[in-house]
Image (tube, grey):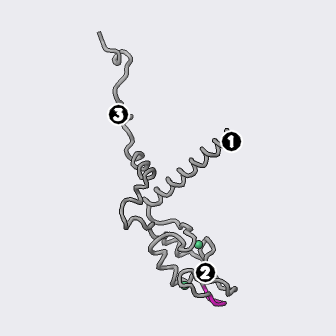
Amino acid sequence: MSDYFQEMGWQELADGETPNHFLHMARLLRDYNMFEELGQNQRLAPPASKQVVENLPNKVISNKDATCPVCLKSHEINDTVKELPCKHLYHPECIMPWLAKTNSCPLCRYEFPTDDETYEAYRKEKIRAKQREEDISNLHNSMFS
Ligand SMILES: [Zn+2]
Ligand SMILES: [Zn+2]
C-alpha cells in the first residue's frame, strides 16, 4: 500500500519552494536596523551623488539675512553660494567637503541621492516599509473611526 503523500502527489519541498534568502536578509536588515549595527564607519550615510552635487544651483545673495549654517558667517550681497534643494544656502567651500562625506543637509537632514547601490536599496526598502505602515494605519482609521 502506497503512503498517503504519494497518493496525493505531494512532495516534501519542491525545488522552486526553497526560502528566498536574499529577501529574508533584506527584511532582517530593515526590521532589526542591522544596517546601522554593521559598525561605526557604516553609521554615516554615504556621500551625496557626485552628479547631484555638481548640478547644485548657484545663487547670488540679494538679502543679507541669510547665514551659512556651516561657518555661521552672513552671506554678503552679491556673494555666489550653493542652494540646496531644501533652500538652505551654503558657501561652496563649506558644503562641498561635507557632501563628499555624507548625503544630507547638515541643518535639516534633507537627504540627497547617493552613488551607493546598497544604501539606495536599503533606503527604498525603508521608505516602502513606512508607506506600508501608513497604509495600514489609514485602513485601520477608516475602519474604526
Ligand atoms: Zn560657510
Ligand atoms: Zn537643509
Residue type at mark 3?
A: Asp
Residue 90 horizontal/vertical position (percent) = 57, 81
Residue type at mark 1?
A: Ser
Q: Which residues are magenta?
A: 75-80
**Rendered-image quarter of ligand 2:** bottom right
Residue 52 horizontal/vertical position (percent) = 53, 71
Measure the alpha-carbon separation of dots 1 and 3: 42 Å
Q: Which residue is located at x 51 percent, y 54 percent?
A: 126
Which residue is the site of mark 2? Answer: 58
Residue type at mark 2?
A: Asn
Q: Say what secondary structure mark 3 lies in.
A: helix
- Crowding at mark 3 (Cα within 10 Å: few <14, some 14-19, many 20+): few
Closer to the chain start, of discs 1 and 2, is: 2
Residue 60 horizontal/vertical position (percent) = 65, 85
The answer to whether 96 is drawn above or below residue 43 in the figure is below
Horizontal side of 67 relative to 45 (left or right) equals right
Does the magenta stretch mainly form a helix, a strand or a loop? loop
Q: Which residue is located at x 36 percent, y 63 percent?
A: 39
Which residue is the site of mark 3? Answer: 15
Looking at the image, which is closer to me, 115 or 141? Answer: 141
Horizontal side of 139 relative to 29 (left or right) equals right
Closer to the chain start, of discs 1 and 3, is: 3
Q: Say what secondary structure mark 1 lies in.
A: helix
Q: Say what secondary structure mark 2 lies in.
A: strand
- Crowding at mark 2 (Cα within 10 Å: few <14, some 14-19, many 20+): some
Which residue is the site of mark 1? Answer: 142
Measure the alpha-carbon separation of dots 1 and 2: 46 Å
Foreground disc of the pair 1, 3? 1
Closer to the chain start, of discs 3 and 2, is: 3
The answer to whether 4 is drawn above or below residue 119 in the figure is above
The answer to whether 24 is drawn above or below residue 105 in the figure is above
Question: Residue 61 colored magenta?
Answer: no
